[in-house]
Amino acid sequence: MLPSVIASPVAEFDARFAAAMATLRLDSCESYLTALSGGADSTGLALLTQRYADAKCKAHKAVIVNHGLRDCSFDEARRVQNRLKEHGVVSEIISISKPRPKSAVQEWARLNRYRILISAARQRNAALLFAHHAGDQAETVAMRLLKGSGPSGLAGIPALRSQYGVIIARPVLNWPSDQLSIFCSLCNCSYESDLSNEDRQFERVRVRQLLTSLSQQADGPSSLQIQRLSKLAATLTTAADEANSNHLSDAIKWNHAGYVRVMIADLVCLPNFRWRLAMRRMVTAVSGGIYAPSSAALDRVRRRIQAGQSATVGGCHFTPVQTLGELGCKGKEYLIFREIGRHVNVTHICGGDEVVFAGCWLVKSKQEGVLHALGDMKRITNGEQLGDLAKNLPDSWRLIPHRARQAIPVLTTLDGRLIYPQLIGDKPRGSIKMVEAKFFGIAKNSVFLADKLIGKIS
């Protein structure tokens, strides 16, 4: 349990946090994992979540990701760990083992930190909590506004979403930026200070200073006004998503083999905003990509589809199945496949583990090896002859379209054997399932608990 602190102000914080958790339906989760950097925001969130978990008799743990970008980074992580331990918060330090790139180091660190946190949350069947607050939201929306983003971009950081079968939540997203540091003070808990928060080489720092300057002007837009813009954009985007879901429920058919069948006739009547929104959802789900295609790219795809042509965008290939004349699109069908790309995607997996492959597959294996797309076999073997590969495919795979088959993950064992996954929806071949693969795209709901996904594959 956390040590006793000043009762009245802390009780008020506890009540506000419990209300925020209930609003996001996080009170139904049995376990929580807090992303802990050691700064005021993440420290405050870790303390609040621990108090909430103790009161609700639920599990909580914090994870500190050591990027290794500074010589003293591990010592700092250990200091944060020991500090939070004194306040009743158990934490784990996980270091990034991948070699550091020569450029875009901050982006590399961010993506690997995110990957590690998602994996840790999935293994614990926990909701992953981040400490983003209203100030972070205003900065994000301002950056996107300056880049000309549309409503979906101006919606900003979502308070709740699901990725790779993990609930990702930001329960204090509506809180003013000083609240978490105030809570740290109430708990008599210190925190780390990051000098990069004042470094103008970073876009977010420049935008933060710009917002501060504008808020001091009588006629300048304030952070509060930008947050209202974000809420309005989020409302519009949510309404468009719901309309698309109702309108396109019969037009979009997800296949467990990792692709989508789309009746284009039901999409051509959509206004541009709803078209782009629907396409972004499908493309990112099929490709497993981190960033959605631009509006300009999606508009080009729309023109090609209306002409009955194939198209490529965001790591996906749009393949026409049927074209009835040059006028109109009635009756047209398209298949959307993930492209395996120019670079070979190889993911190591240990026996008994589960990993995310290519951002869109959850794979569980009873044997150690490397996962890769079937279509990358020739490149992995340096062009060796694979004459027996096609004839040795499982019978069920022969019914899967060629492009989809090329992108499905398979396992090459340490002794060179090739093992195919038991796809959800196929009948098992034999009594032992060595490799199982679940396509994330078939989970149509935007939020679902990790155990509901993993329970189907365990």
Image (cartoon, helix red, strand yellow):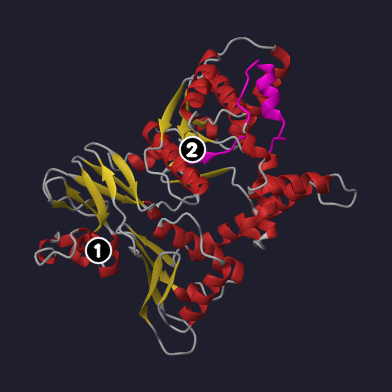
Residue 314 appears in which quarter of the rendering?
bottom left
Does residue 184 belong to the magenta stretch? yes
Residue at figure coordinates x 72%, y 31% from the top left: 178
Which residue range is magenta in the image?
167-193
Q: Nearer the viewer, residue 100 or 243?
A: 100
Q: In the displayed orientation, state which residue is furthest to the right.
A: 218
Residue 401 x %, y %: 26, 69
Residue at figure coordinates x 55%, y 74% from the top left: 299
Residue 362 x %, y %: 33, 47
Does the rendering let one see residue 173?
no
Circle 2 sits in a helix, a strand or a loop, which is it?
Answer: loop
Residue under pointer 2: 69
Q: Nearer the viewer, mark 2 or mark 1?
A: 2
Does the rendering let one see residue 248?
yes
Q: Amino acid at mark 2?
A: Leu
404 is higher (above) or lower (below) than 219: below
Circle 1 sits in a helix, a strand or a loop, which is it?
Answer: helix
Residue at figure coordinates x 69%, y 19% from the top left: 185
Distance from disc 2 to disc 1, alpha carbons, whole Å, reads 36 Å
Residue 198 x %, y %: 68, 39
Q: Nearer the viewer, residue 213 or 350?
A: 213
Name the disc covering residue 375, or none: 1
Quadrant containing the C terminus is: top left
Looking at the image, how many numbered discs can be counted on the residues? 2
Residue 364 appears in which quarter of the rendering?
top left
19 is higher (above) or lower (below) than 254: above
Mark 2, Cα crowd under 10 Å, few <14 / some 14-19 / many 20+, is few
Q: Amino acid at mark 1?
A: Gly
Residue at figure coordinates x 31%, y 50% from the top left: 438
Does residue 192 belong to the magenta stretch? yes
